[in-house]
Image (cartoon, rainbow, N blue to C red):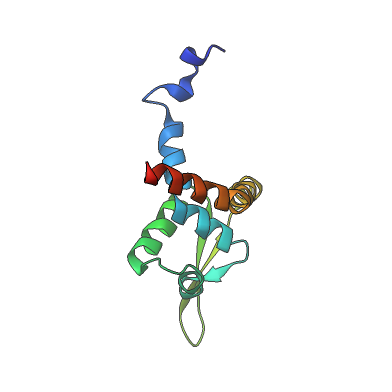
Amino acid sequence: MHADLDPVYRADCPSRAILDQIADKWSMLVLMVLREPRRFNAIKRRLDGITQRVLTQTLRKLERNGMVTRTVIDGKTLGVEYALTPLGKSLEAPFAALYGWTVDNMDAIQACQARYDQQ
């Protein structure tokens, strides 16, 4: 298919909203942290710098998109556990590859940024 006709490049393509919702830094990091089911506070402790509000919004967005399940846990202390759905798990390999690429190229990118900023 010719690139100009590919629907992914159209302003009304649903892929844009989906990419926007799953490819932001917090969504990607939450999905990586949830490779093991975790409670809200455990996720928050793991993700240094995330606010409670942003984590709540991110989890709701991921749940709405079918990436995460939310389970209320009864017991001495009421809690909520989050886990990946099969759809969410399917992002593990692509996100791990992107994360690995980022770590592998971090120094080179920072050097490029420093050179650019000195211009």
Residue 34 coordinates in the image, percent (x, y):
57, 62
Residue at the spot 37% in from the left edge and 25% down from the top edge: 12
Q: Is residue 33 above or below residue 119?
A: below
Q: Quadrant of the N terminus?
A: top right
Q: Quadrant of the C terminus?
A: top left
Residue at the spot 48% in from the left edge and 13% down from the top edge: 5
Residue at the spot 41% in from the left edge and 67% down from the top edge: 49
The image shows a total of numbered marks equal to: 0
Image quarter of residue 35: bottom right
Residue at far front of view: 119
Q: Is residue 3 above or below residue 53?
A: above
* Of 100 and 117, the residue lying toward us: 117
Left or right, 70 with reference to 49: right
Residue 60 coordinates in the image, percent (x, y):
41, 56
* Of 76 and 10, the residue lying toward us: 10
* Of 51 and 41, the residue lying toward us: 51
Residue 64 coordinates in the image, percent (x, y):
44, 50
Residue 62 coordinates in the image, percent (x, y):
46, 52
* Of 58 and 68, the residue lying toward us: 58
Residue at far bottom of view: 76
